[in-house]
Image (cartoon, rainbow, N blue to C red):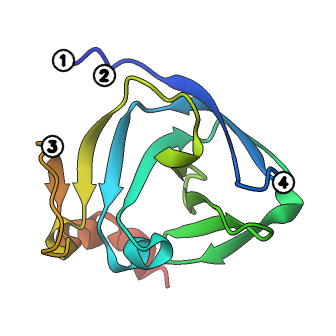
Amino acid sequence: MSDLDSLTLTAKAQCLCGDVTIMANEINPKFTVCHCDSCRGWGGAPFFAVQCGTEVVIEGKQSIKEYDSSAWATRGFCVECGTHLFYKLKETGAYNMPVGIFSGLDNIEMDMQYFSDQRPHYYCFSNQTKEMTRAEIMEYFASAIAGD
């Protein structure tokens, strides 16, 4: 068991223009990377995300636009500067946020790669992590997809 297994972190984030600030109080220090087409299309690269749960305080909500990106989640961004702010699960309201919008997040490690079978051949990571394929993700979210 790693020292990070029972840890949660608190950190503050903000968009580039400062219109939106976020305080996440339950950050899981084991971050994930998603290689799906949507995440790569959204940010031009894989999505490096920290799971932040639901204990999130957002100021400047008037500057946030949410996009209904899948049967199970929405994505939020700042309408002023375009900063990607979150990927939010519809069923639980739990947030996944880009690692890079938080300043001073130390002691984190990559733990999981989602849609590993959709990772393009032009990059790879040396980290040894768990991986889930597209089929495994679709099975995991089958109940949300069936509701459409």
* Residue 19, numbered circle: 4
Element marked by disc 2 = loop
Q: How far apart in space, not on screen, are marks 4 and 3 (Cα)?
A: 35 Å
Instruction: Name the spot of residue 17 as percent of width and height, x first.
Output: 78, 56
Q: Which residue is drawn at 54% across and 28% down?
A: 104
Q: Which amino acid does label 4 sit on?
A: Asp
Q: Which of marks 4 and 2 is in front?
A: 4
| Residue 71 shows in the view | no
Q: What residue type is labelled 3?
A: Asn
Q: Which of the two discs, 2 and 3, labels the residue nearer the N terminus? A: 2
Q: Which of the two discs, 1 and 4, labels the residue nearer the N terminus? A: 1
Q: How crowded is mark 2: few (under 14 residues within 10 Å), some or many (20 or more)?
A: few
Q: Do the residues labelled 2 and 3 touch (CB within 8 Å)?
A: no
Q: How crowded is mark 3: few (under 14 residues within 10 Å), some or many (20 or more)?
A: few
Q: Which amino acid does label 1 sit on?
A: Met
Element marked by disc 3 = loop
The residue under label 2 is: 5
Element marked by disc 4 = loop
* Residue 1, numbered circle: 1
* Residue 109, numbered circle: none
